[in-house]
Image (spheres, rainbow, N blue to C red):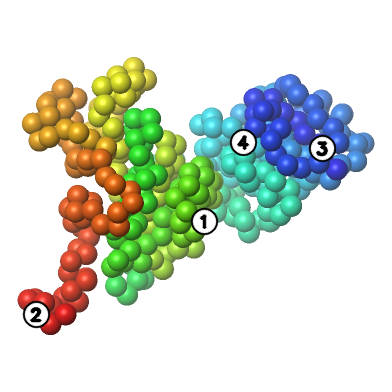
Amino acid sequence: MNVKVVNKYESLLNNVDVDIIKSISGVFTPQDLIAQFNNFFYNKMILDITAIENYENIATMQELSVNMDMSKVVILLDDSKVVNNPKYLSALVSMGIYNFTRNIDAVKFLIENPNSYKDVAQYHQLNAVMDNNIEDDDNKVKNEKKNKEEKASDSNDNSLRIIGIKNVTEHAGSTTLTYLLKKQLEKNYSVVAVEVDKNDFVYLNDRSLKSTSNFELQKFISSNYDNDVILIDLNEDGQENCCSDVLYLIEPGLIKLNKLIRKDSQIFEKLKGKKIILNRSVLDNTDVEDFESESNSKVYYNIPYLDDKLDNHVELEYLLQKLGFNNEERSKGNKIFNIFK
């Protein structure tokens, strides 16, 4: 039987289909948890990280790891920047804490299929452990990009393109656009599409569409380097630094734009120089110019409402050409006049 320690994510964890013999709710110090469960027999512990007092201090997690069998603990992480920092995750791995996730659906899986070091090695910054010299975030991004480019250059045809699609306004259509781009590209390219931290792809009834967690995204990319293109539905919070291109989706409706500005008045300043895509747009060229003037931004492409039941959209073909794809050339086998088909 299993035990459960919950706080912020209590309602979510109550829906996890596992047998529970004991459950406690609240915020506890490591000493509290050690005292309660040190002599209590259980199979696995489901631990909501927000139930640990001062959990963002990695020393707190170290105290737990020293006094509890962490191979029996599955930790549901929160979305704080500290906990999701690569240095924090690397420290967890260094302590022998391997079973952690932000995906509620992965909790039951980890209970039945606990991770080994091999499963979490991608989070482990060995240079930080061995040299006591953790590289800063800018160098980390540069090195990841360099490694990605070197690995992709082994391809005999085209280098791997990793394109992220990210919602800027709420529900701007990243899931559907990822799906439509996949259908448009796969006529001439080897393409895989994946969504991050959600399961919306299931409603498209296409078994080739994949889902993964933000933590496991790099692992997914590494296992799919033999494709021409990886399309990533980043939703709102997916990692951008793993992508060679990111399309930032804005649905230019009045209510959604006002919500966006109230949420972050500096959003268009942050998007300067990035590929802004107006999606599900009813704006014409003059409207787009007005949008650019008022927002002090540059629109990369304007996509109207599209019929997601169709397999081909000329509007997406033009977008892909702008991104550097040449479906026409590949489909014609590089023939100049294409007289004989």
122 left or right, relative to 280: right
Q: CA distance from mark 2 to mark 3?
A: 69 Å
Q: Secondary structure at mark 4?
A: loop
The kind of residue tagged 3 is: Ile
The residue positioned 49% from the left and 59% from the top of the image is 207
Q: Work out whether 238 lies above or below 115.
A: above
Q: Nearer the viewer, mark 1 or mark 3?
A: 3
Q: Which residue is mark 3?
A: 20
Percent position of residue 199, x then y = 52, 45
Q: CA distance from mark 1 to mark 2?
A: 45 Å
Q: CA distance from mark 4 to mark 3?
A: 20 Å
The dot on residue 77 is 4
The dot on residue 339 is 2
The kind of residue tagged 1 is: Lys
Q: Work out whether 326 lies above or below 338.
A: above
Q: CA distance from mark 1 to mark 3?
A: 31 Å
